[in-house]
């Protein structure tokens, strides 16, 4: 190795990146972050509380220190601020369930070389089926991903002060937008359109937040459901556009514009990339997941969303940061 040749450490860490998923998923499975949040600070203490081997606890802690989610100070381990905020069980924005879900997906990456060659998935994804037996695991796990955008929407849309507003959440999944927005505004009501197996989960989760009496579910597929005319003050289309084509998104946006009352707003949240496709990092990487799972989906650009929404009849389109996503508000 010459003096000006870079060390291989960075490339080695990237090549072994699947261990990041593995160590976080395993730690989340055994609630390691939660036990540490509650005072466990050594491998022995973690092992006792989690019911795992001390050797296994030590290996997990070593791995978590390596990837920067746990710190070690004078012989005791503790969560970093990021781990405390996003990986402790029971916190509103906890991604612990998401980490466990992603651990179960790691095997699909082996298909990526062939998928890249042919440009589409090798088999139809189960997430496009209403009777997917895994919804009970998937729907709650991905809910936390939408928490930042839902919280940002409270402020951006002035929901708390908006009075008796009506909300339509298209493909609402867990009902996380309804849970947060109905809690912010006791006079608001929300309808969620989704498949019945998913709506059943949403009714339970929204009910657990104490706002189920103002939450109604509509069973159906948004591709062919009539949204009505001038019925809603706010419509939500969150983490759906990435799995649809340009033509499909324009068609749905057009129907949603018609469903909004005069002055109403459409909220679109998704992983959106810069127009030159240079950033942000996660949405760029997410394009590969779409290649694995969707024949037509992708991570679309700011200019794509602006163009689609203007074609759908909206006049004012703004973008708001809600990491890991971007929130678009169209009026």
Image (cartoon, rainbow, N blue to C red):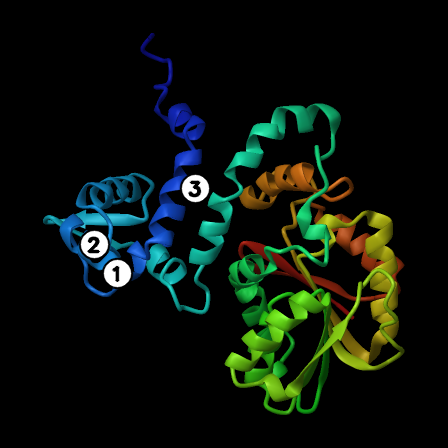
Image quadrant where residue 143 sits: bottom right
What residue is drawn where x is 34% and y is 24%? 9
Q: Secondary structure beneath disc 2?
A: helix
For the residues labelled 3 and 1, the Cα–Cα distance comes to: 19 Å
Q: Earlier in the sequence, mark 2 or mark 3?
A: 3
Q: Pointer 1: residues within 10 angstroms few (<14), some, or many (20+)?
A: many
In the foreground, 120 or 309: 120
Q: Which residue is mark 3?
A: 21
In the rendered view, tell whether residue 259 sits above or below residue 121: below
In the rendered view, tell whether residue 208 sits above or below residue 103: below
Q: Secondary structure beneath disc 3?
A: helix
Of tags 2 and 3, which is closer to the observer? Answer: 2
Q: Which residue is mark 2?
A: 46
Give the left or right position of residue 25, taking residue 230 as reference.
left
What residue is drawn where x is 33% and y is 49%? 27
Q: Secondary structure beneath disc 1?
A: helix
Q: Which residue is mark 1?
A: 35
């Amino acid at each position: 190795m010459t003096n000006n040749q870079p060390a291989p450490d960075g490339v080695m860490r990237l090549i072994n990146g699947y261990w990041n998923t593995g160590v976080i998923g395993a730690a989340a499975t055994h609630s390691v972050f939660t036990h540490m949040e509650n005072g466990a600070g050594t491998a022995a203490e973690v092992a006792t509380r989690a019911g795992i081997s001390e050797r296994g606890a030590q290996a997990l802690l070593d791995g978590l220190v390596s990837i920067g989610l746990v710190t070690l100070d004078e012989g005791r381990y503790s969560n970093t601020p990021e781990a405390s905020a996003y990986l402790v069980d029971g916190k509103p924005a906890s991604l612990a369930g998401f980490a466990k879900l992603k651990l179960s997906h790691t095997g699909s990456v082996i298909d990526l070389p062939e998928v890249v060659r042919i440009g589409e998935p090798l088999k139809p994804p189960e997430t496009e089926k209403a009777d997917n037996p895994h919804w009970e695991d998937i729907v709650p796990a991905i809910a936390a991903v939408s928490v930042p955008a839902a919280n940002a929407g409270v402020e951006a849309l002035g929901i708390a002060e908006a009075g008796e507003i009506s909300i339509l959440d298209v493909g609402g999944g867990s009902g996380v937008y309804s849970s947060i927005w109905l809690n912010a505004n006791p006079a608001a009501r929300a309808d969620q359109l989704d498949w019945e197996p998913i709506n059943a989960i949403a009714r339970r989760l929204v009910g657990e937040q104490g706002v189920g009496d103002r939450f109604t579910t509509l069973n159906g597929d948004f591709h062919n459901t009539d949204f009505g005319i001038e019925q809603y003050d706010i419509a939500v289309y969150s983490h759906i556009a990435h799995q649809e084509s340009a033509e499909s998104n324009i068609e749905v946006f057009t129907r949603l514009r018609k469903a909004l009352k005069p002055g109403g707003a459409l909220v679109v949240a998704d992983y959106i990339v810069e127009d030159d496709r240079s950033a942000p990092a996660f949405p760029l990487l997410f394009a590969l997941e779409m290649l694995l799972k969707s024949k037509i989906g992708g991570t679309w650009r700011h200019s794509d969303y602006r163009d689609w929404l203007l074609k759908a009849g909206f006049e004012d389109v703004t973008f708001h940061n809600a990491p890991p996503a971007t929130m678009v508000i169209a009026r």
